[in-house]
Image: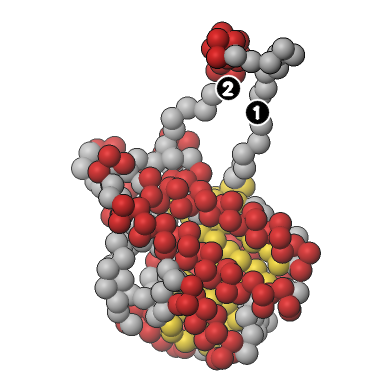
Amino acid sequence: MGMMQDKVVIVTGAGGGIGRAIALAMAAEGAKVLVNDIGASVSGEGNDQGPAAAVVAEIAAQGGQAFANTDSVADAAGAQRIVDAALARFGRLDAVVNNAGILRDRFFFKMSNDDFDAVVKVHLYGSYYMSRAAANLFKEQQSGAFVHMTSTSGLIGNLGQANYAAAKLALVALSKSIALDMARYQVRSNCIAPFAWSRMIGSIPTDTPEQQARVAKIQQMTPEKIAPIAVYLASDAASKVNAQVFAVRNNEIFLMSQPRPIRSVHRSEGWNPQTVAEHAMPALQADFLGMERSGDVFTWDPV
């Protein structure tokens, strides 16, 4: 009996990389898995039924139960069809892993509206559409788990990823709101920020020695390292874990902070622009956060 025995799970973007690893791990723990992937390129173009079908074949070869779905999460109707397909095939739904994503990295001054819209549509709207499609079902059955993939590009920062970072940080707020609104119905929502070498991360530039060193470190971290915590968060064993943000880097698991006040200043007579400049900012400046990127915070080699 596995941790997900007889549960039904949807994993989006499961045709490769982290999604594939999670789908395989869910099945190995006894889950019935809907493997969703439209088979697009990293930047979101094209369709191919092959990746999802290949993962289903892998699960079947290991004695598990799964079927493929190629609807897009980037529109509400597609997300609803994905949920309906899981119900039609397996008769229930217990967890949704929002993993589907694309990348269109550009420096901000070069980013087009289409680049921004496309990435936000898949990562943020896709997670919303999938979660909303399953929400009433989870409410009625008084159980269910959402697992969303965020990123340290949003939590901390990164170059050339304004679209991706904006979507990923917004996804943390979405997850928290779902958790707050649905906790009374025993529905949980948590986030994972994964460090793993995958097809998406494979598009990171390697033009400089610093970029090459960063990619070399990431290549040590396989998608399979992310799967255990995803399986756990989807399972009944995580019934007390809600509204949290975790990061996984090789063999490390981090609980990430969420925004809270760190210092305050007060003037009983109130503020004007001059006193803000002369009093407030000098008092607060020692605690300003730096313009850090993910690699500036996670400076040590993966362990």
In percent of width and height, residue 279 lies at 60, 10
Q: Is residue 123 left or right of residue 93?
A: left
Image disc number at residue 262: 1
Question: Are the residues flagged by discs 2 and 1 in contact, CB closer than 8 Å?
Answer: yes
Q: Residue at x 39, y 66 (%)?
A: 17
Q: Nearer the viewer, residue 239 or 217?
A: 239
Residue 78 in the image: above or below residue 166: below
**In-front residue for pair 280/224:** 280
Residue 280, percent from left and from top: 60, 15
How many numbered badges does the structure rendering display?
2
- What secondary structure is marked by label 1? loop
Secondary structure found at label 2: helix
Residue type at mark 2 is Asp
Badge 1 amino acid: Ile
Q: Nearer the viewer, residue 256 or 82?
A: 82
Q: In percent of the image, x 46 and y 53: which residue is there?
A: 167
Q: Which mark is residue 287?
A: 2
Q: Mark 2 and mark 1: span between their CA atoms?
A: 8 Å
The structure residue drawn at horizontal position 65% and vertical position 68%, both measured from the top left corner, is: 145
Looking at the rendered image, the quarter that the N terminus falls into is bottom right
Q: Is residue 15 left or right of residue 131?
A: left
Q: Is residue 83 depicted above or below 201 in this figure? A: below
Residue, x 59% and y 18% (percent of image)? 284
Neighbour class for label 1 at 10 Å: few (<14), some, many (≥20)? few
The residue furthest right is 184
Q: Is residue 237 visible?
A: no
Q: Is residue 272 visible?
A: yes
N-terminal label among 2 and 1: 1
In the image, residue 67 lies at what x, y percent? 47, 87
Is 294 located above or below residue 42 in the figure? above
Percent position of residue 69, x then y: 43, 83
